[in-house]
Image (cartoon, helix red, strand yellow):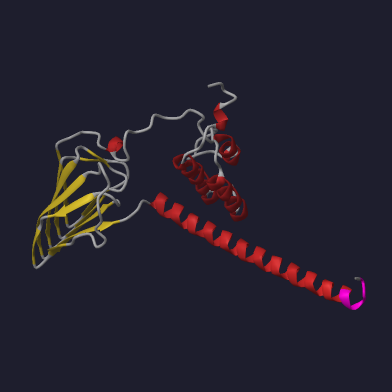
Amino acid sequence: MTDDAVPELRASDADREQVAEVLRDALAEGRLDMGEFEERLEAAYKARTYAELAPITRDLPASGAVAPPPVSFTKEPVDSGGWAGRIVGGQESATAVAVMSGFERKGRWTVPRRFNCFAFWGGGELDLREADFADREVEISCVAIMGGVQVIVPPGVEVVVRGIGVMGGFEHPRDDERPDPGAPRVVISGFAFWGGVGVERKVTRAERQRLKEQRRQEKVERSQARHELQRARREERWEERRERQRRRHGEY
């Protein structure tokens, strides 16, 4: 494929979301006002090719860099499956301890095959939404004594809760669902005494923002459609009045 043809490649949802993230950073840094942000964001989500995406962020830095290219014209290899790229192997076990304190694991990190955590008069948070996994099945063993541990998993991951609570408890995800094909399995075990281990499903912040922008765009489109319909009806009524006037004055 020649260089002239490359910009005509079809853009993916990930490409559009990359551009949207640059726009959000620019808005937060004061590089764009709200009107410019909304105009460019709408153009980004409507873009079909790289040639349409590239001009949107050409005058903006990405993630604080000096002058990065707004969109790469080189396609990266596609993973064989939605979860295949996140099963990366790695360490067998790891431990986190909170004694009258706290711990957290979030962002891009690798969940080992067995993760042991202990909370005494303290708490911990394990956010798996952006994490990689050492294996297709990982176990998180939690001991919470007068403390608590919160586990956040993304949609599509299978969750099995096997913990025991004494004057405490292990919560299952409230909106449990059929797992995605190839998704990892997370087994949550352990013991809670006067404490608890909670499990909940949440989408990532980027996905939540994308859904919010999508709903906003749909609202704008519905509003535009209503305005167009009202305008068409006004024009129809105006034409009917003109027709009646012409008839009264004998123009026919």
Task: Name which residue lies at 55% across and 27% down.
Answer: 6
Is 102 magenta? The answer is no
Q: Main secondary structure of the magenta part?
A: loop
Number of marks drawn? 0
**Residue that protrudes farthest toward the bottom in the picture:** 248
Q: Is residue 172 visible?
A: yes
Q: Is residue 30 visible?
A: no
**Residue 208: quarter of image:** bottom left
The image shows residue 171 at horizontal and vertical percentages of 18, 62
The image shows residue 127 at horizontal and vertical percentages of 27, 50
Task: Name which residue lies at 30% across and 52% down.
Answer: 155
Q: Please name whichever residue, 219 or 109, is drawn nearer the observer in this view of the structure.
A: 219
Is 248 magenta? The answer is yes
Report the span colored magenta: 247-251
Relative vertical location of residue 187 with respect to residue 8 in this rendering, above or below: below
Relative vertical location of residue 236 with respect to residue 17 in this rendering, above or below: below
Q: Please name whichever residue, 188 or 95, is drawn nearer the observer in this view of the structure.
A: 188
The image shows residue 167 at horizontal and vertical percentages of 9, 68
**Residue 81: quarter of image:** top left
Q: Is residue 50 left or right of residue 239?
A: left
